[in-house]
Amino acid sequence: MTSHKKILIDLFIEHHDRFLSIADLSALIPLGVQIDQTTIYRAVQNLEKNGLVESASTDKGHTGYVLRHSDHHHHHLICTGCGQIVSIPCHPDLWQDVANQYNFQETHHKVEIYGLCEACQKIDKHSSP
Amino acid sequence: MTSHKKILIDLFIEHHDRFLSIADLSALIPLGVQIDQTTIYRAVQNLEKNGLVESASTDKGHTGYVLRHSDHHHHHLICTGCGQIVSIPCHPDLWQDVANQYNFQETHHKVEIYGLCEACQKIDKHSSP
DNA sequence: GTTTTTGCAAAGGTTTTGCATCATT
DNA sequence: AATGATGCAAAACCTTTGCAAAAAC
């Protein structure tokens, strides 16, 4: 465990409710500390390999990373207003059933739901004409 | 409609059951014909804009394109063995309900199911010890 | 003849790699 | 000393853009 890696983990903990891109991480590094972009890439790959963070491709195809809080497979609700993400449980049977209907044997799946969280719905209403 | 664009559309029709990347398209262009990579990018963007093809990010985060056969929103079953894709209907209520449980207002979602098609399951069994 | 498409070259952005240096054990 | 982490530079990739030539209408 190096100090740089610790800084990155702290960033993930602090922002455990959003996807952080490499650029995000780079921008969030505290003043006075310099971490090379290459180092961030390597550290994040390392964290992902060790299961501390998980990756997902965001709305526009960019890659984001977020702290893994659970060993259980789950999906994400992503607020397109504020970027907040909420983990939601997965119901594996559902996907297996769907796949079986087409004679497929399901191995894994990707599910992401985008929308507006409660707070952003209100903001949205206020800004509407 | 130009001859180059026609060639690309023909490729999409011929391989309507797989995701084609830009590189795939480039490789599939008939012998004797040369189409610049830039042209492929631009043509595919054009086809997507006009709703003839749709894009999706594959298993490993790469972008693939496939012919759009339906105006209805749907999802994909993707065989990790042979690459075959099968479109499956979407049940929008399901996602809205899930989102509502967390006080989210669903706007859109991404669902992709990976597995083995019937044929590849058999191959898989044969090759197993 | 006007508009659109094409190829080429170049640039932009993101991610990876090689290598020498530095830190940690 | 040995291993792993870091910074720097460069490369590899993928995608986009500018511009002049070619093709389509």
Image: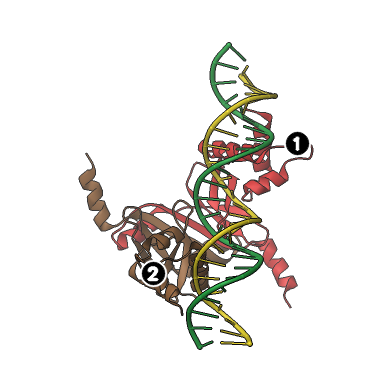
Chain colours: A brown, B red, C green, D yellow
Tell me what residue is drawn at x 46 percent, y 61 percent. A22
| Residue farthest toward the right in the current orientation of the protein | B32
Where does label 1 land, which residue?
B33
Disc 2 element:
helix
Mark 2 nearby-residue class (10 Å; few <14, some 14–19, many ≥20): many
**Marks 2 and 1, how far apart at CA:** 50 Å
Tell me what residue is drawn at x 45 percent, y 71 percent. A53
Q: Is residue B22 left or right of residue B93?
A: right
The amino acid type, in three-letter code, at marker 2 is: Phe
Q: Is residue A88 left or right of residue B75?
A: left
Mark 1 nearby-residue class (10 Å; few <14, some 14–19, many ≥20): few
Task: Give the letter of the chain under mark 2.
Answer: A
The amino acid type, in three-letter code, at marker 1 is: Val
B104 relative to C18, above or below: above
Q: Are marks 2 and 1 on the same chain?
A: no
Disc 1 element:
loop
Task: Give the letter of the chain under mark 1.
Answer: B
The answer, for residue B100, to whether it is visible in the render is yes
Relative depth, front residue between A47 and A18: A47
Q: Give the percent coordinates (x, y) of residue A24.
A: 40, 59
Quadrant of residue A16 within the rendered picture: bottom left
Where does label 2 land, which residue?
A12
Q: Nearer the viewer, mark 2 or mark 1?
A: 2
Q: Give the percent coordinates (x, y) of residue B94.
A: 39, 58
Q: Is residue B98 left or right of residue B12?
A: left
Q: Which mark, by number, is residue B103?
A: none
Q: Give the percent coordinates (x, y) of residue B5.
A: 64, 33
Relative depth, front residue between B8 and B94: B8
B11 relative to D3, above or below: above
